[in-house]
Image (cartoon, grey):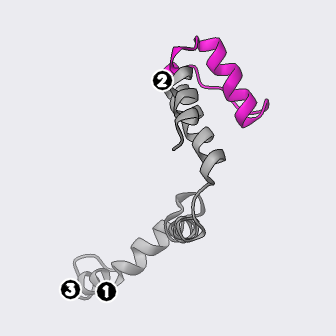
Amino acid sequence: MEQAKLREIMGHKDYTLSELKAKYKALYGPESATPSNKVYLWRKIAYKLQELEHGGLSSQAQGKIEEFIEKYDPVNNKFKDYKISKYSDILSKISLKGICPL
C-alpha cells in the first residue's frame, strides 16, 4: 500500500466518533446503518479505502463465496438439506435396526 493511503488510514484513528460516522456515511452511503463502535468504524473505513485503492475480491474468491452461500445458506434451508443427505445412510441403518423407525 502506498504511504499516502497508509497515512490517510492511520490519520482516521484520531478522529472523533462523529467524524468517523461522517466518513463512514460518505464511503458506504447515507442510507447505510452507522455503527457506534469507534474501533469497528475505523476498521470498516480502512477496509473500504483499501478496497477502493486496490479493488475488491478477486472473481475466484467471489465465486468461492457464492459457492459456499449456495451450499450452506441457512436462510433458504440449504444447509438443512445438506445435513440430511449427508447422514441419510446413517439414518437408514438406524431405522433398519428398529431403533428409530422413519
Tell me where the magenta segment starts and ends, as one range: 13-38
Q: Kindly identify the residue that appears in the image at 53 percent across and 28 percent down.
A: 7
Is 53 on the left or on the right of 100, as rendered?
Answer: right
Residue at horizontal 72 percent and vertical 28 percent from the top: 25
Magenta stretch encompasses residue 99: no
| Disc assigned to residue 16 | none
Q: Secondary structure at mark 2?
A: helix
Element at label 3? loop
Dot 1: few (<14), some (14–19), or many (≥20) neighbours within 10 Å?
Answer: few
Residue at x 57%, y 64% (from the top left corner): 58
Q: Name the residue nearer the viewer: 9 or 63.
A: 9
Marked residue nearer the N-terminal end (1 or 2)? 2
Secondary element under disc 1, as helix, strand or loop, is helix
Q: Name the residue beneath numbered marker 3.
A: 97
Question: What is the C-alpha distance between the residues marked 1 and 2?
Answer: 48 Å
- Residue 17, x across and y down, in percent: 59, 13
Q: Is residue 32 visible?
A: yes
Q: Which residue is mark 2?
A: 39
The residue at which mark 1 appears reads as 89
In the rendered image, is residue 102 in sight?
Answer: no
Q: Quadrant of residue 75?
A: bottom right
- Of labels 1 and 3, earlier in sequence is 1
The amino acid pointed to by label 3 is Lys
Image check: 54 left or right of 100? right
Name the spot of residue 2 as percent of width and height, x first: 54, 41
Quarter of the image for the C terminus: give it. bottom left
Q: Nearer the viewer, residue 97 or 79?
A: 79
Q: Amino acid at mark 2?
A: Val
Q: Residue 35's x, y, as percent?
A: 60, 25
> As drawn, which residue projects farthest toward the right?
30
Give the quarter of the image for residue 60. bottom right
